[in-house]
């Protein structure tokens, strides 16, 4: 699934190395964006959740926690009511077709059926307003969209 | 991320979690959670002060809960904020670990 929206304004970029310790950079970056765009606590929670899930998946599964593979996250508004995040990596192809297709989490039969740490994509599907993936020549691009209130953007 | 333990009547252990259960917060409480779960039969996980929960935070709840339940014990989740509760429900964790917003009901569920 590809998003039909396009980022068209200058935004902010966060660059991380492919190690879990770098995820600590995400929170202060999102905090600053939340102030800049006056996004609600609910949207800030959703953005933080989706970025942590996306980035931890890339680092753990795409790069097997091996460092020295830069991952970029670009943030830009799209019009007055959308904030878009584009995550690009150089990891092997992610298999999106089954992973990004809407498919509510099946109720596990027992707690032993719950895969610890394996809920990331399910959570992204629930908390992002749009979610799209594309294969790049040397990596992957994940685009996450969030609807935001418009006054701060309109005033900026 | 902070973790406080209270021993209540009836052999119930109340674990109060406070902060963000992101990947960093989860790492901070994992060891303590597993130690508590290793000796508790009735575990009340107090989530009132948890302001964020990601999948690694879920792991920090599920793994010790598995431990308690394998030994025939019980685990309940208490009073998550709405967004944290939404994470729990999206992951269907609530079908296995009941969520209660009233303390009396949570304690009753552990008896």
Image (cartoon, coloured by chain):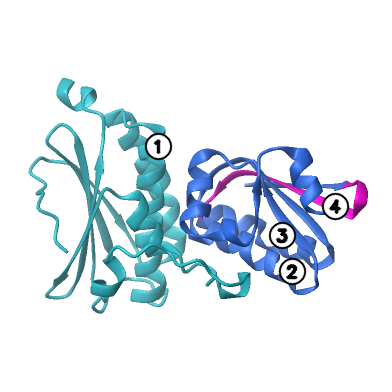
Q: Are marks 3 and 4 in contact (CB under 8 Å)?
A: no
Q: Quadrant of residue A44?
A: top left
Q: Which residues are magenta?
A: B8-22
Residue B69's disc number: 2
Foreground of the two, B6 or A92 = B6
- Identify the secondary structure beneath mark 2: helix
- Find disc 3 in the rendering and name its residue: B33
Q: Is A141 located above or below residue A39 in the figure?
A: below
Q: Position of residue A5 (x, y in %)?
A: 11, 49
**How dense is the environment of label 2, judged by Cα within 10 Å: few (below 14), some, or many (20 and up)?**
some
- Identify the secondary structure beneath mark 4: strand
- Find disc 1 in the rendering and name its residue: A42
Q: Is residue A130 left or right of residue B38?
A: left
Q: Is residue B50 left or right of residue A121?
A: right
Magenta run includes residue B19: yes
Frontmost of labels 3 and 4 is 4
Q: Residue at left 79%, top 39%?
A: B104
Q: Chain of mark 4?
A: B
Q: Position of residue A113 (x, y in %)?
A: 56, 75
Q: N-terminal of the two: label 2 or label 4? A: 4
Foreground of the two, A141 or A13 = A141
- Identify the secondary structure beneath mark 3: helix
Q: Which chain is blue?
A: B
Mark-to-mark CA distance, 4 and 1? 33 Å
Question: Both on one chain, marks 2 and 4?
Answer: yes
Mark-to-mark CA distance, 2 and 3? 14 Å
**Residue A147 visible to an observer of this rendering:** yes
- Identify the secondary structure beneath mark 1: helix
Q: Chain of mark 3?
A: B
Q: Chain of mark 2?
A: B
- Find disc 4 in the rendering and name its residue: B12
């Amino acid at each position: 699934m590809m998003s039909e929206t396009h980022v068209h304004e200058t935004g902010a970029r966060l660059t991380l190395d492919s190690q879990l310790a770098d995820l600590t950079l995400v929170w202060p970056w999102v905090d600053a964006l939340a102030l800049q765009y006056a996004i609600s606590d609910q949207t800030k929670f959703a953005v933080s959740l989706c970025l942590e899930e996306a980035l931890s998946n890339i680092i753990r599964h795409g790069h097997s926690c091996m460092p020295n593979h830069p991952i970029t996250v670009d943030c830009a508004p799209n019009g007055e009511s959308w904030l878009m995040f584009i995550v690009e990596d150089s990891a092997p192809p992610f298999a999106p077709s089954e992973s990004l297709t809407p498919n509510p989490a099946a109720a596990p039969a027992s707690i032993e059926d719950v895969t610890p740490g394996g809920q990331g994509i399910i959570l992204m599907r629930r908390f992002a307003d749009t979610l799209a993936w594309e294969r790049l020549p040397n990596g992957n691009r994940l685009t996450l969209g969030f609807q935001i209130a418009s006054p701060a953007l309109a005033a900026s | 991320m902070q973790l406080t333990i209270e021993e209540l009547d009836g052999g119930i252990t109340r674990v109060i979690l406070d902060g963000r259960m992101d990947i960093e917060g989860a790492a901070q409480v994992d060891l303590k959670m597993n130690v508590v779960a290793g000796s508790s039969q009735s575990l009340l996980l107090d989530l009132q002060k948890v302001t964020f929960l990601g999948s690694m935070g879920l792991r920090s709840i599920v793994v010790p809960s598995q431990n308690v339940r394998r030994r025939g014990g019980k685990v309940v989740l208490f009073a998550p904020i709405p967004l944290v509760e939404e994470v729990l429900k999206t992951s269907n964790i609530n079908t296995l670990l009941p969520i209660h917003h009233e303390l009396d009901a949570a304690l009753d569920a552990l008896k």
